[in-house]
Image (cartoon, grey):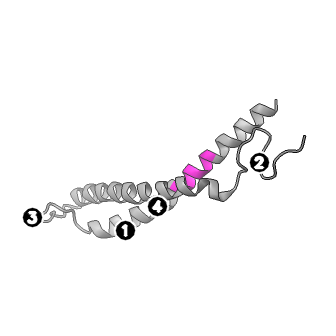
């Protein structure tokens, strides 16, 4: 019996980049926001250590925007890369365990 073209023995979709597109986009948004928030917290701690007075009106730490940009970019790159790497590793392990 001939197998359908483009599928694997278990009937799963092949391991191609479009299969991870949705997870990568969701992880990009989460990494961008999460990285920025963590960086602003680090800016708050750095401001406390350097005795930099926060903004009187909003309570924003000194130079928070610089920290936020770097943290958001790092999070937007790191979180999707780790997410897709872990998903691919899990699928490879599942395929290897099915083969015996």
Label 2 crowd bin: few (<14), some (14–19), many (20+), radius 10 Å: few
Q: Residue 21: percent from the left, percent from the top?
A: 57, 58
Circle 4 residue: 76
Q: Which residues are magenta?
A: 80-87
Q: CA distance from mark 3 to mark 2?
A: 61 Å
Give the CA separation, mark 4 to mark 1: 10 Å
Residue in the picture at 77% in, 36% down: 96
Image point (27%, 54%), residue name: 45
Secondary element type, mark 2: loop
The x and y percentages for residue 43 are: 29, 60
Picture quarter with the C terminus: top right
Answer with mark 3 or mark 1, whichever residue precedes in sequence.
3
C-alpha distance separating marks 3 and 1: 22 Å
Work out whether mark 2 precedes mark 4 in sequence or the reverse, and give the earlier one.
Answer: 2
Q: Would you name the residue on which mark 1 appears?
A: 69
Q: Viewer-nearest of labels 4 and 1?
A: 4
Mark found first going from the N terminus, 4 or 3: 3
Alpha carbons under labels 4 and 3: distance apart: 31 Å
Residue furthest left in the image: 57
Q: Nearer the viewer, residue 84 or 55?
A: 84
Instruction: State the residue lying farthest toward the front.
Output: 1
Q: Name the residue that disc number 2 marks.
A: 7
* Closer-to-camera residue (13/39): 13
Residue 56, disc? 3
Q: Answer yes or no: do the residues labelled 4 and 3 have beta carbons within 8 Å?
A: no
Seen from the viewer's position, the closer of residues 24 and 81 is 24
């Amino acid at each position: 019996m001939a197998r359908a073209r483009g599928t694997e023995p278990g009937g799963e979709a092949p391991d191609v980049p479009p299969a991870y597109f949705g997870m990568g986009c969701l992880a990009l948004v989460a990494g961008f926001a999460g990285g920025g928030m963590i960086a602003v917290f680090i800016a708050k701690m750095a401001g406390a250590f350097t005795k930099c007075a926060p903004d009187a009106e909003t309570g924003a730490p000194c130079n928070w925007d610089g920290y936020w940009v770097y943290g958001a970019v790092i999070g937007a790159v790191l979180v999707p890369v780790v997410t897709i790497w872990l998903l691919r590793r899990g699928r490879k392990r599942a395929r290897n365990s099915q083969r015996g």
